[in-house]
Image: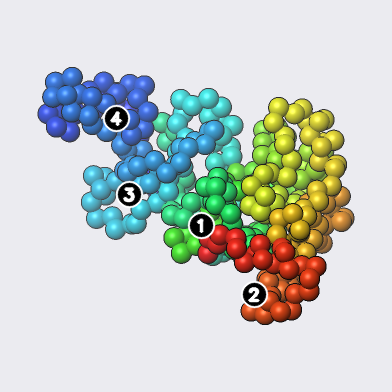
Amino acid sequence: MSSTFTSTNEEPCSSCGLLLDVEGASLLALVKCPRCRSEVRVRSRFGSYELLDVLGEGGSSRVFRARPDQQRDPDSTSSEVALKVLEITQPDYIENLFFLRNEAKHAALIRHPRVVKVMALEEEEGGACLAMEIMTGGSLHDQIVSGSSLDEQWILESGLEILKALSAAYAKKVIHRDLKPANILFSGSGGAKLADFGLARSLAAVEEGESESAIEHHLMATPDYVAPELLEGEVGDCRSDLYGLGGCLYHAITCEPPYRTEEKSLEELRELKRRPIQLSFKKWNLLPETSSLVNRMLAPDPRDRFASYDELEKAFRQALDRLESLRKNPSQCNGGVSGWLSGIFHRVGKS
């Protein structure tokens, strides 16, 4: 159920009651009262939610830790949520609202433990907001930029968890089309979940002849990880998402994205993505199985990638089984692999 956004441009100071002019102030802005000199938070409510603090900020929206507004519903016992907020005053609001609606629609189709749960979408005169479960473990992007080396087993296990999310989506004929480290989130216990279906596409709709909107034809996915066929204007399929996941794994291993795409034109990106990636197991202290898996996921031609989620899951499990076997029995190594195995054992784990 939707509620009405407050339209007033004045809010009382929580210390002395003086009405403060909050026109133009951002959500949860800190304002100094001219009478009592207290610094107070203003614009702390949006829709039917009370905003508690900022969890993150992207190019088109801000995400807040929030809870149902107790002033509007004193009997509410709902827990806290992550609230993605679009304000109507933001640039490109209509375009971004399209993506928010798309995210809500497709996430609602996929009920799976490895997909971030979406609870509700509200649209009102002041904007729109999407309530989701809170992921307290940060994102894969956060892990990468922390500067710590990520354990190979942890990377493979996280990739396998996201693969399960993609498989659940594909069972509903949905492809994500925007795999990137910022969209791989972690719970407090460390489990990985897939977020942000804003660019997702329903293959069922494609089969029924539904055309993409003008907005969807723009290249919105992060160029570092987007599959080459999407750059050619194709809808893509499961192999396109496997490519994006492969790019995330490559970034987690090397701390660099698979391609440097800054300030490149569409034609330059197409040319760049035709060049195969070669992840060296010796250079990065990896199992050969791991480097082979990532290289195949990132093959420029979709026909050279894994053909299905089941085939890739088998490869993940083989790499994990091999890694576990070598950890338990280092004597299985021959001299040619002893150097990189030593590197594996000395990587800093995150699990």
User: Is residue 290 placed above or below 47 in the rendered structure?
Assistant: below
Task: Kindly identify the residue that appears in the image at 78 percent across and 71 percent down.
Answer: 335
Q: Residue at x 81, y 51 (%)?
A: 278
Residue 325 lies, with reference to residue 347, above or below; the image says below
- Tell me the CA gap for discs 4 and 1: 30 Å
Q: Where residue 132 sits: x, y (%)?
A: 46, 51
**Which label lies toward us, 3 or 2?**
2
Q: Which mark is residue 327?
A: 2
Q: Which mark is residue 316?
A: none
Q: Earlier in the sequence, mark 4 or mark 1?
A: 4
Q: What residue appears at the point 33 percent right and 57 percent down from the top-left corner?
A: 78
Q: Quadrant of residue 43?
A: top left
Q: Which badge, 3 or 1, comes first in the chain's sequence?
A: 3
The amino acid beneath tag 3 is Pro
- Visible in this render: residue 210? no
Judging by the rendered image, the residue that carries numbered circle 1 is: 186
